Amino acid sequence: MTDQAGARSASPASLPAVVCRGVTKSFDTGDAEAWALRGVDFEARRGEMMLLAGPSGCGKTTLLSVIAGILDRTAGEVSVLGHDVHAMSPSRKTAFRRENIGFVFQQYNLVPSLTAAENAAVPLLLRGMRRHEAVDRAKETLASVGLGELTGRLPTQLSGGQQQRVAIARALVGRPGLLVCDEPTAALDGTTGAQVMETLRASAVGADRCVIVVTHDPRVFRFGDRMSEMLDGRITGVRVPGATEVHHA
Amino acid sequence: MIYVAWKMLTGDRAKYLSLVVGLAFAVLLMTQQGSIFTGIMTRTFAMVTDISAARVWVMDPGVQYPDDLKPLKDVDLPRVRDVPGVDWAVPLFKSNGRAKTADGSFQSVFVFGLDSGTLLGGPSDFVEGKLTDLWQPDAVIVDEAGAERLGGVKVGDVLELNDRRARVVGICRATRTFVSFPVVYTTYSRAVRYVPGDRRVMTFVLTSPKPGVTDEELADRIRAATGLGAATQGQFTEKTLRHYARNTGIVINFGTTVVLGFIVGLAIAMQTLHSFVVDNLRHFGTLKAMGAGNGLLAKMVVFQAVVVGLLGYGIGVGFTALFSHAAKRSPQIAVRFTPELMGLSFCAMTVLVALASLLSLRKVWKTEPAIVFRGS
Ligand SMILES: Nc1ncnc2c1ncn2[C@@H]1O[C@H](COP(=O)(O)OP(=O)(O)O)[C@@H](O)[C@H]1O
Ligand SMILES: [Mg+2]
């Protein structure tokens, strides 16, 4: 990849990693338009874990998809790591995701016939790295999330929490500037969910990286640095988990 | 990522096998029907190609195919010999006859009368005996499959051929002809005696050109000089095929089966490959979200299609080859699995795989990467 969008973005930690201004998104549902986002103003910085919380159906996943550049917004500005993602051509956007964004999904989305290490190596393979090198690096990353002993296991031979940690390793292996996680603990029990969040905090959060975690599980709120609260397609407030005071975004 | 594509493909054994088996079945259907068709068509002109020394066949102008028996006159032989450019010309007699078997029943046979001097047109592959044994008194040679139909006659047995005594001196292997009567070879002079009066004449004159004269030139010259029909091996073969294509349902019948095989194969290939892709849409979507471009996804899908395509082709062709090999031992089944047929079915398979992967690829390309965030 030689184009600019594909190049790794390296803006200083002081600058916000993600900025949304007046972002709207409507889905054409046949007879009527459904507005999933109704003017979102949102900001997340490098070096922090930003939670995005709110009731089911309020638009969290839609916002995360727009930020990650896998869903087009209807209107508004979206800046990710200093780039206007939605101004890019589809192929540049794809390259931008490949270089800069790590994904963690509620359903893990691991390929069942690949080992933990091979699954975690996929983002490096997508960048064109040779398989052995990619798998070696994936093994190091797996070790950093506490799965150093299980690199040869298939997903079916791992517990849910372990699978999600493989997914976290996969998201981190390419050292992206932005990590987007959609309800990473929703499929797990409380204890396991907490362990996964601990893993995420310990391995993902760093000075150079912004981590956005969508959740509606109050038990994991304490792991976030800040939390944006969402309702009916809008951000209603930003607060520090544990504190009661609400700062308006 | 080709490795990942391979793993995705082979990860689910059952699905992978059903893909390969489906395609193998389609190829089997096409090549097997195709080779039976080729086999049967080959039989229609087997006599012409078997007698390879006869470069040009002279016959009644109305003859359309080798079993179309229209007699020539005795004087036609010297007339052909007189045509400039003729190296040699010998008569070949072919007629229907009636043989009485040991148990007293009658069986229609083809009687071949060979030029006594050269025995040209006789069989070359013998189970027992040899061609020159025909020079013995009352001698005939019977083909292997025919011998069985005549009640299992053996060398030394005596048959009655149109009420005349015929002694079996050899059993040969002949290429089966389209009309599968037993074939009885004897000499020309004896053959005409076996057959009733009005047919006591030769059927073909076999000739070959002198050096420097092409087969086609010679055929042209003979036609012009004698007014008889004359055809090179190639021309006679083509004429025969045209006759069978025009006057029998063979081409339509088998053509339909082969086309059907192709269509069924296409349906199977498309359906199985498509359902494989649909089953894996979530993974393709995940790859898309993580930054896999359309080109890479195309490579993966095409690779998967080509792998199952090649495997299916190999297995299908392998079974057809086995089948045609086994069928060689049975003189009843006409099977000819030619390289052309292999090439043709490979092309068909390529088209199948291309269409199937195109269909699947459309599905992958149209998949919104945003589906990955939706619960399953
Ligand atoms: N592809 C879609 N087509 C139509 N409506 C959609 C689609 N995706 C989401 N929505 C609607 O947008 C709203 C927000 O959905 P979502 O972002 O998934 O909410 P959350 O993740 O907070 O539960 C919901 O009302 C949902 O029905
Ligand atoms: Mg959601």
Image (cartoon, coloured by chain):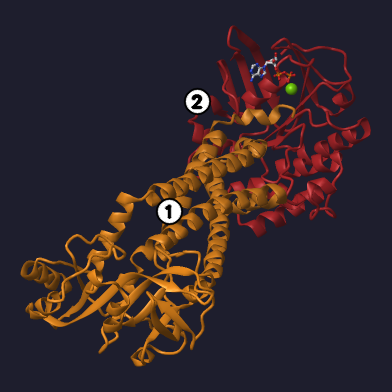
Q: Is residue B251 left or right of residue B296?
A: left
What is the distance, in whole Å, between disc 2 and disc 1 at their CAs? 44 Å
Instruction: Give the foreground label among 2 and 1.
Output: 1
As drawn, B175 above or below A195: below
Residue at 19% over, 79% down: B208
Q: Which chain carries label 1?
A: B
Q: What's the residue type where badge 1 is placed?
A: Cys
Q: How many marks?
A: 2
Q: In the rendered image, which residue does mark 1 sit on?
A: B347
Query: Tag on residue A87?
Result: 2
Residue closest to the eye, B111 or A160: B111
The chain letter of the orange chain reads: B
Residue A99 visible in the picture: no
Residue at 70% over, 55% down: A135
Classify 10 Å Cα crowding around label 2: few (below 14), some (14-19), many (20 and above). few
As drawn, B216 above or below A123: below
Q: Position of residue B73 (x, y in %)?
A: 16, 72
Q: Where is residue A25 in the image (x, y as percent from the top left)?
A: 60, 15
Q: What's the residue type where badge 2 is placed?
A: Ala
As drawn, A229 above or below A104: above
As drawn, B118 above or below B346: below
Classify 10 Å Cα crowding around label 1: few (below 14), some (14-19), many (20 and above). few
Do dots 2 and 1 share one subunit?
A: no
Q: In this view, does B317 lie to the left or right of B175?
A: right
Residue at 43% over, 53% down: B347
The chain letter of the red chain reads: A
